[in-house]
Every structure is written in C-alpha cells, then in structure tokens.
Image (tube, rainbow, N blue to C red):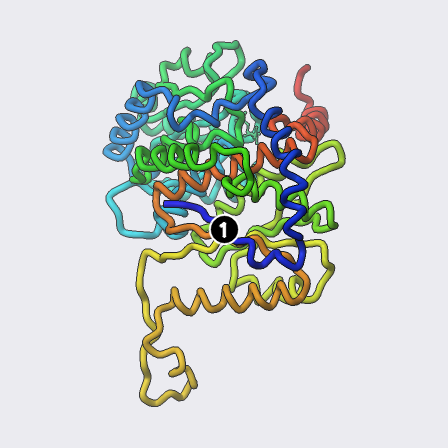
Amino acid sequence: MAIRLKTDYLTSFISEHEYALIQGEVNAAHENLIKEGEPSEKPIGWMTLPVNYDKEEFDRILKAAEKIKKSCDIFIAIGIGGSYLGARAAIEFVKGASYNAKKKDTPDVYFAGNTIDPDALQELLEICEGRDICINVISKSGSTTEPAASFRVFRELLEKKYGAEGARERIFVTTDKKDVPGKLKHFAIEKGYETFVVPDDIGGRYSVLSAVGLLPIAVAGCDIRAIMAGAKKAMEDFSSTNIEENDCYKYAAIRNLLVRKGYEIELFVSYKPSFMYMNEWLKQLFGESEGKDKKGLFPASVIYSTDLHSMGQYLQDGRRIIFETVVDVLNSKNEVKVPYDASNIDNLNFLADKDFHYVNKQALLGTLDAHVSGGVPNVVLELDKMDEENFGYTVYFFELACALSGYILGVNPFNQPGVEVYKKNMFKLLGKPE
Ligand code: PA5
C-alpha cells in the first residue's frame, strides 16, 4: 500500500534547484502546522488520529454497524460537506460507484441533508417506501440547516413507521460532545439516541476517519480497521520534513511552485469512475482550506477518459492556467478483456484479448504526453489499488498535503469564515430569529 509521487512530467515546468529553494518554506510551514494551539484554533487531531483514536468508541461503531446491517435495507447518512463527502468517497472507492445497485448482504446507503432540493428529497422518500430504514445524522456544529431540515423529515417518517420507541433504535447521531440547548447533542440526549463524537480538534473536512465517516463506511461492509491501518502507515511514511524523503510534502511544495507560475487551477484526474466522490472530497478539502484572503488554488476534477470527450479540448488547447494531478491506480479489482470477433466488422481486433485495465493505462500514458506537450504540468501520484487500506492511506496523504500546502501559501487551512456570508443572507430571507 502506498502513494508514490512521479515528477517525470514536471521537468519542463519546475527546475531541480527550485525544489531545494522551497525546502526552507516547507520547514517553516511544518513548524506552523505542528505549533500548539487551542483545539478550536488549531484542529490538528487528525494528524495523530490513526493511532490516537478512541478505541471504546471504535468498538461501539462496529457494534452499531452490525445492528444497522441486521435491521434495515436502507441506511441514510444525513450530513453536508465534511459530514458526508468522506463516507461517500470511501464507499464508492472500496465498493464501487454502483454499490447500491449491486447484490449484497449490506444495506443500500443513501445520503441526504446535502441539498435543500425538494425533488431529491422526495425521490429518496419514494425509494424508502416499503423498506426498513436506519438513519445517521452527522453534524459537528449540530446546527447546520440543510441536515437539520432533512433530519426532521426522516425522523417523522421513522416515528410514524416504527413509533417513538422503535425509531429510537434506528436513529444514530454523530456530533460535537458538548450538550448545548438547541443543538443536536442536546436533542439526542432528550430523545435517547445513541451518539458518536466528532472530536474538538478535528474539523469537518478532516473528519472522515472519525465516527463521522466510519459508521456509514462500516455499514456498507468496508473494513474500517484496515482503513485506520492504512492511515497509520501513511502517518509513518510521511513523517520527514525533507521533501526528497517525503512525497506528501514534495507534492505540497509542487502545488505552491506551480501556482506561483500562474497555474492557478489544480485539476484532479482519475481514470476510475469510482474515484469521482474522492475527487469531490478533494475539492472540498483543498477549496475550503485554501480559498481565503484572496489566495488559493482552485480545485477542479475530471474522470478520464470520459471527460476527455468533453473537457479534453480545453485541456489540450485552452488557457495555460491549469495543472493536472493524476491519481494513477496501478491495479484494478477485475480483469475484463475485449472479446475477439472473427468478422472484425468494427475494426476492433487490435484490442482483442487486451484487458480494459491495460487499455485504460494506455489512455493515461497517451494523455499525459499529449497534455504535457501542450504545456500542462502533470503531477502523477501512483496508488497501488482501491481498497480500504489504500483509502486510509490516501486520505491521510491528502489531508497532510493540504494542511502543509495551506501554510506554505500563507493561509489558515483549518477555518472557513467565507461560508458564513451565504448563511447570514439565507437566514435573513427565511426570517430566522436572531
Ligand atoms: O469542513 C467543514 O468544516 C465544513 O465543510 C463542514 O463539514 C460542513 O459545513 C458541515 O458542518 P457540520 O458538520 O457542522 O454540519
């Protein structure tokens, strides 16, 4: 299990001496990152989470997941932003993008509370008809409007279907540990729901390896011990501050070198549709962590070769403000070969008996060369495969890279003051009492 950084496609964009020159900034950023502070100001609990997690709570998560698996066909995780993207990314990464449609002995997993669209909500309510349901409402602050509103809808559904007692056995709450009237923890205590904690020193977008992500991920049948083991391995692998020994820190340095040269958009590229929600998670992680004080790289994402037929033209030939970060997954879970057809009417026998993984790899190699020759820097991150251990490893790699990169950029990668502006306006329009 590993992520390896390849700089072969960067040589015409970054000179060797630039790596040596930025090392001092990396050292300073590292010192800033590990400097002590109040948990709310300096939420770096995720850095040691792979070894310091609450073992008693971890066992309760496993028990709750078993109970949920036995008692429902549909599990709904209600949360937004960092309170749902990591879990969704993990399930698709490990189990595939069509997890819900597959034959399996675990519940379907749906996500709610990440939109206020009535059509999406109604669609899910219809999917729930005639099926047994459990829900997990996830909100660190315990007061976010989108999940709170959806929670009301599903709570009412469960109470009507199972009665107050029955619903209590099917509702799980993941939130801050403080009991504050009007907030989710207080509500959960009043109603007697089982609760899990979002640690004080872990912010939303860095929380997937806490109960926030682990309960939904475990319900989907993923091995959460293996996820933690993968994250622990990454924690050990990326402990040096020397960028020639630490691919994670070198990647953070490269992002900063490239943005200074005008490559302001980082396009996360994968050749696997099951990486799509990992891309979404990455966009939140980097966008919310770095986009402030009028600074920050703009994170975008594509799945190739699909999007080469929509965005490929722009990448090859459009404005030179984009660099690509390609996650090259070295092994696929399945082998599927292109069949041989004696008639060859479709002229496809040049692919006959070739594995789709191999064909996909040639698309990757061909695109790398094409885009680099077109003036697009490409960072390549090789990932062994898409299983639980590699998920934990990947999460840790990017969280650490993002935090360090933010400090090199000169921003606080742990706050998100900008998100309050829309909320204020929306609440005013909705007449929310002060
Ligand atoms: O990273 C963050 O802090 C945010 O994206 C939050 O995860 C998101 O706003 C949801 O917040 P909460 O978990 O408090 O409902």
Image x and y of residue 18, in percent? 67, 46
Looking at the image, which residue is at 34% across and 52% down? 101
Q: Is residue 340 visible?
A: yes
Image x and y of residue 394, in percent? 45, 42
Image x and y of residue 292, in percent? 71, 33
Q: Which quadrant of the rendered structure holds the N terminus?
A: top left
- Rendered view: 145 above or below 238: above
- Rendered view: 306 above or below 78: below
Q: Nearer the viewer, residue 137 or 200?
A: 200
Q: Which quadrant of the rendered structure holds the C terminus?
A: top right
Give the residue number, with chain letter if any, for mark 1. Answer: 381
Image x and y of residue 61, in percent? 32, 26
**Residue type (three-letter) at the residue carrying disc 1:** Leu
Q: Nearer the viewer, residue 434 or 273?
A: 273
Q: Quadrant holding ligand 1? A: top right
Looking at the image, which residue is at 52% across and 61% down? 304
